Image: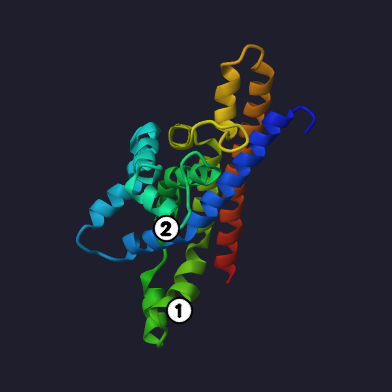
Amino acid sequence: MGWLGPEEWQAVTLSLKVAFWATLLSLPVALAVAYLLSRFRFPGRDILNGLVHLPLVMPPVVTGYLLLASLGPQGVIGGWLEAHLGLVFAFRWTGAALAAAVMGFPLMVRAMRLSIEAVDQRLEDASATLGAAPWRVFATVTLPLSLPGVLTGAILAFAKAMGEFGATITFVSNIPGETRTLASAIYTFLQVPGGEAAVVALVGVSIVISMIALVGSEALARALSRRIGMA
């Protein structure tokens, strides 16, 4: 991309890396939580549902501060992880991925939950009646039928991770080559005289990636729905 300089290109590739790992690592957790919320009734269910969706309504800066306070070098969890496992999240690209995962998690869980709730439970009950274990019912009935929603949630979370700014910059700062993602780079170039060209280029890239993600999620959901309907 000749219209992107080295610094802008670095921000784009870092954002793609952060969004990819944020989506991949949160996918199984989101699927488990979505299944739990859609298929079980238990004490504290509403509290869990509220905690899952809290990042959607809280200011992103608050989410970033909570991550820094708990997982930063001085945080109880962060200090223990660094001392015993050598894991450091604050001011690293891994921390940017974690912040992006937290912010995209509610979107992923919601899409998956709605899709799982749309699966006819009588099909699951019939499979269980035939002797299938719960994990097999989930793998052969629930997951295939809810796959459009699972993929839609993953793609929406990826798009959210690509544009995450508030929680990321609070938790991992804005370090070139390490934590300066697409959104952080746009903010940085807005503060620099003569940075308008870089801002326009990065905004264009952001719009293109977001549109590809949104249109792709819709196309995938329709294709999978048609396949499931034909099966």
Residue at 46%, 41% (x, y): give it. 90
Q: In this image, 55 relative to 95: left or right?
A: left
Label at residue 84: 2
Number of labels in the image equals 2
* Residue 16 visible at all: yes
Q: Position of residue 101 (x, y in %)?
A: 47, 47
Secondary structure under tag 1 reads helix
Amino acid tagged 1: Arg
Residue at 68%, 30% (x, y): give it. 8
Amino acid tagged 2: His
Q: Position of residue 72 (x, y in %)?
A: 40, 42
Residue under label 1, please give it.
136
Q: Position of residue 174 (x, y in %)?
A: 53, 31
Q: Quadrant of the N terminus?
A: top right
Above or below, 109 against 166 in this view is: below
Residue at 22%, 64% (x, y): give it. 42
Label at residue 119: none
* Residue 149 visible at all: no
Above or below, 100 against 139 in this view is: above
The local crowd at label 2, few if under 14, some if 14 to 19, many if 20 or more residues have their Cα within 10 Å, is: few
Q: Quadrant location of residue 30?
A: bottom left
